[in-house]
Image (cartoon, rainbow, N blue to C red):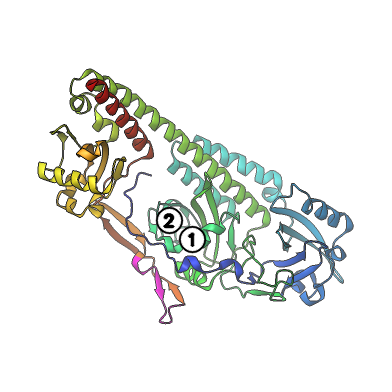
Amino acid sequence: MNQVPIDKNYDSDFCGSIPLHLVNLIQPHGMLLVLDKADHRIIQASDNTARFTGVAAEKLLDQPLAQYLPAEQYQDLVSKVGSKHSYERLPFSFTFLGEQDQTPLTALVHTGADYILMELEQNEPTSGDTSFKGFYQHIKYITSLLKQAGTSLEMAQIAADEMKKLSGFDRVLVYQFDPKWNGVVIAQAKEKDMDDYMDLRFPASDVPRQARELYFRNPYRLIPDKSYKPVRLIPIINPVTNRFTDLSDCNLRSVATVHIEYLTNLGITASMSLPLIINNKLWGLISCHHKTAKHPTYEVRSALELLSDIVAAQLAGKERERTIMTKAELQRVHALLLEDLYTNTNFADGLMLGEPNIAHLLNLTGTAVIYDGGLWTNGQVPNLHEIKELVSWLRRNKTDKLFASSSLPKEYVQSKEYKDVASGLIALPINAEQGEYILGFRTEVLQTIKWGGDPNNAIQMEPDGKSYHPRNSFATYQETVKYTSLPWLQEELEVAETLRSAVLGKIIRDKF
């Protein structure tokens, strides 16, 4: 997406400092056991184990896990958890041997440095479309659709449509982060009576820093019912570490109260979000909403987890394809431009007057060359005095490096006077000490940004300065972004540096 950048930072240091992983509470749709890593004794248990197993948490404490599992299941667990090649998160199907009943449970096991976390939920029977075969067919079909998509936006829309069908959620959004961590809804599939968030932008404080970091450790975040009552761990302090148990890797981890308020203000009861990680960076989220309580089965969640990985891989492939095509086109134009550069006596004429010229290469609306006491211009540029002042500012601040800005008036206040022709600037130094530059300009592009609620009121602090609330309205709030041009692509910056080297080479060749 080639969007005008947002200058203001809506991320929140306060929200980003809250230790979400040390809550000591879980959601009640599952139970949690913490095991001693050496002998697999149960050292902590959530206070709802009786609901799932018929055995109270207090009775489980200090007991060997082997007492509650069939021998072959326990041995399977020990062999995998103890393996040098053990994964961070392993799924199991267990039969829990209670005092009276045998309970089938699905488990996720996390091996930490000091202890083992075991998340357990009821094991739902599968059949038909919820069988492995059914999910495999769904995933193969959706993958084939994604591969046929022409653009990233088409791919995102396919993902939203198909994941809504597969999951049964009322609304599925594909949400892309901008460079300042504001999120833009780039695809949506929803029921008719759900609010429309397509193309709306949400401030970075909606998904604060520490929440973003946890997406690298959790394949999804599920809240089946926001009105749940949190379940505590017994005992409160982990006897191995003498601290709260770190629940960073735990899907059952309880949710901050402020996020429950946020869901209430959105008008939803259940949510599930899955990260889209590309090149080890959080590119965006797939966010699923439901008006009423909803608890997808382990199989559905696993299918959605796999699909989010496939979507991320396909998006990464599409981005690589775009990069390759962009670079190929820039290299083609650059090669033609070099012919004019080297055949012209005056390199400025070679840069600006041919077809194609530097404006075609770097998508410029105006060009100026300041060299050897002369000034050459083409297209829409500031006047002579303004260019001289701009060059003086560049000499004072930017030394001899390539410089590019898509919001020049916010960095160099005097340029507000000619924002219409120079809201964007790229400066290629020839001899910075002498004030000799190649300058490329881009005109101002006014863009109306539609926010999901006023981003300036995204956080409402209490008088104590410690508690806060999310905004209570997601009504569209429009903001006009001024003093900005189209952003500079990384590929454009790279080819600009290559062109600069070619110009310097020609100057040296002509002189000597």
Secondary structure of the residue carrying tag 2 is loop
Quarter of the rendering occupied by the C terminus: top left
| Magenta stretch holds residue 494 | no
Quarter containing the N terminus: top left
Q: Which residue is drawn at 81% across and 61% down?
A: 38
Which mark, residue 307?
A: none
Residue at the spot of label 1: 209
Q: Quadrant of residue 248?
A: bottom right
Judge from the rendering whether residue 6 lies leftward or rightward of residue 147; answer left or right. Answer: left
Question: Magenta part of the protein: which range?
Answer: 456-466
Taking the spot 47% from the left edge, 36% from the top edge, the residue there is 320
State which quadrant residue 220 falls in: bottom right
| Place of residue 450 in the rendered image (x, y in percent of width and height, measured from the top left) | 33, 57
Q: What residue type is labelled 1?
A: Arg
Q: Is mark 1 on a helix, strand or loop?
A: helix
Residue 181 disc label: 2
**Badge 2: few (under 14), some or many (20 or more) residues near its Cα, within 10 Å?**
many
Q: Identify the residue at horizontal 45%, vertical 63% (top origin).
A: 206
Spatial distance from mark 2 to mark 1, Cα to Cα? 9 Å
Question: Residue placed farthest to the right in the image?
Answer: 71
Q: Note whether 61 is above or below 297 in the view shown.
A: below
**In this orientation, does residue 482 appear?**
no
Check if mark 2's residue and mark 1's residue have beta carbons within 8 Å: yes
Q: Which residue lies furthest to the bottom in this view?
A: 464
